[in-house]
């Protein structure tokens, strides 16, 4: 499962999903989509600015937090996906626009459904609809067109994708076997170099190599990369990150992707938080029977949310 890179944006997403009415969430989807199209990957963005652009509210939380453009692009895509999935399903007959199913939009753009689902985490909005009594993801032109306009190169590249032939796979493995002998030849770097040479995506090349290593462990080109990380290694990664070592540096050291490093860091952080023996903060009013109705009653101002 793809994880947020910044807990603050994960928290913001959870708050909107839980407390914001559906109509307001639809408005936030459009605002988040516009912000996503404007991001400069080389810049940093204050969290309070991001929150204001999405919710029209500037919070007091995280006043000093700056988010790298690449991380913001990643997390905004997840925010958009989770907001869309949280909306109640609408009967397809009640939608004013023509609705495309996952299969239909995949065929139209000449990509696989897996690619469409990956694009949903990059800002492509799909809304829950009811079709023949079943809940499905529907794609509306008014929500799809902005994504297509902002991601022309990605969409064109995806449309040109075709499955690798056995000859192409063999060529990838031949080149990888040679490059893996170089001291700096990490899986990520080798995949990038081969992808540039063969005109394929780095992820396609990387998957081909990892799949070969899993199926042929005795001939694995990158044996240290195919298996899961043990707990000791995860703790080392987390401790190194806490000491200020950059995620890119950790990814190269452990021959994993940046996403894998963030996943490990968040996993260890979550386990440590869950292990804390904290139940509640005691207050004298808990022992006063006269306060029972107030403490156990409805939250004040709940309707405002």
Image (tube, rainbow, N blue to C red):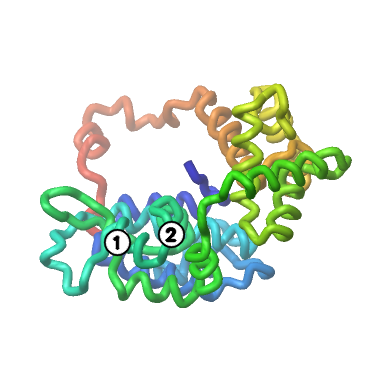
The residue labelled by disc 2 is 111
Q: Nearer the viewer, residue 216 or 222?
A: 216
Residue 128, x across and y down, in percent: 25, 56
Task: Identify residue for label 1.
Answer: 104
Judged from the image, the secondary structure of the residue bearing numbered disc 1 is: helix
Taking the view exactly as shown, the residue that stands out farthest to the right is 183
Q: Is residue 164 above or below residue 55?
A: above
Which numbered disc flags the more N-terminal residue, 2 or 1?
1
Q: CA distance from mark 2 to mark 1?
A: 10 Å
* Dots 2, 1 in contact, CB < 8 A: no
The image shows residue 68 at horizontal and vertical percentages of 64, 61
Q: Is residue 48 visible?
A: no
Q: Is residue 279 shown left or right of residue 286? A: right
Specify whether residue 52 is in view. Answer: yes
The quadrant of the image that shows the C terminus is bottom left
Picture coordinates of residue 193, whole percent (x, y): 75, 54
Image position of 180 (left or right of 160): right
Q: Is residue 62 left or right of residue 251?
A: left
């Amino acid at each position: 499962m793809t994880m947020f890179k910044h807990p603050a944006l994960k928290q913001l997403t959870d708050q909107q999903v839980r407390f914001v009415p559906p109509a307001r969430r639809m408005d936030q989807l459009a605002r988040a989509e516009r912000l996503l199209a404007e991001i400069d990957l080389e810049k940093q963005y204050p969290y309070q600015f991001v929150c204001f652009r999405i919710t029209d509210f500037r919070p007091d939380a995280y006043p000093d937090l700056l988010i790298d453009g690449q991380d913001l692009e990643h997390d905004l895509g997840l925010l958009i996906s989770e907001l869309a999935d949280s909306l109640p399903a609408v009967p397809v007959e009640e939608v004013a626009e023509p609705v495309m199913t996952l299969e239909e939009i995949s065929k139209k753009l000449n990509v696989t459904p897996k690619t469409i689902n990956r694009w949903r985490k990059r800002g492509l909005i799909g809304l829950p609809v009811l079709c023949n009594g079943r809940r499905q993801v529907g794609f509306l032109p008014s929500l799809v067109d902005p994504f297509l306009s902002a991601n022309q190169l990605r969409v064109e590249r995806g449309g040109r994708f075709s499955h690798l032939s056995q000859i192409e796979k063999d060529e990838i493995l031949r080149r990888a076997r040679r490059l893996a002998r170089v001291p700096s030849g990490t899986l990520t770097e080798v995949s990038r170099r081969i992808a540039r040479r063969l005109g394929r995506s780095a992820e396609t090349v990387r998957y081909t190599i990892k799949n070969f290593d899993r199926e042929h462990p005795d001939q694995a080109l990158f044996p240290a990369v195919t298996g899961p990380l043990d707990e000791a290694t995860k703790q080392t990664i987390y401790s190194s990150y806490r000491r200020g070592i950059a995620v890119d540096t950790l990814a190269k050291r452990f021959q994993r992707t940046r996403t894998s490093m963030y996943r490990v860091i968040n996993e260890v952080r979550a386990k440590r938080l869950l292990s804390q023996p904290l139940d509640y903060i005691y207050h004298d009013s808990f022992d006063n029977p006269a306060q029972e109705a107030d403490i156990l009653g409805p939250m004040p101002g709940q309707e405002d949310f």
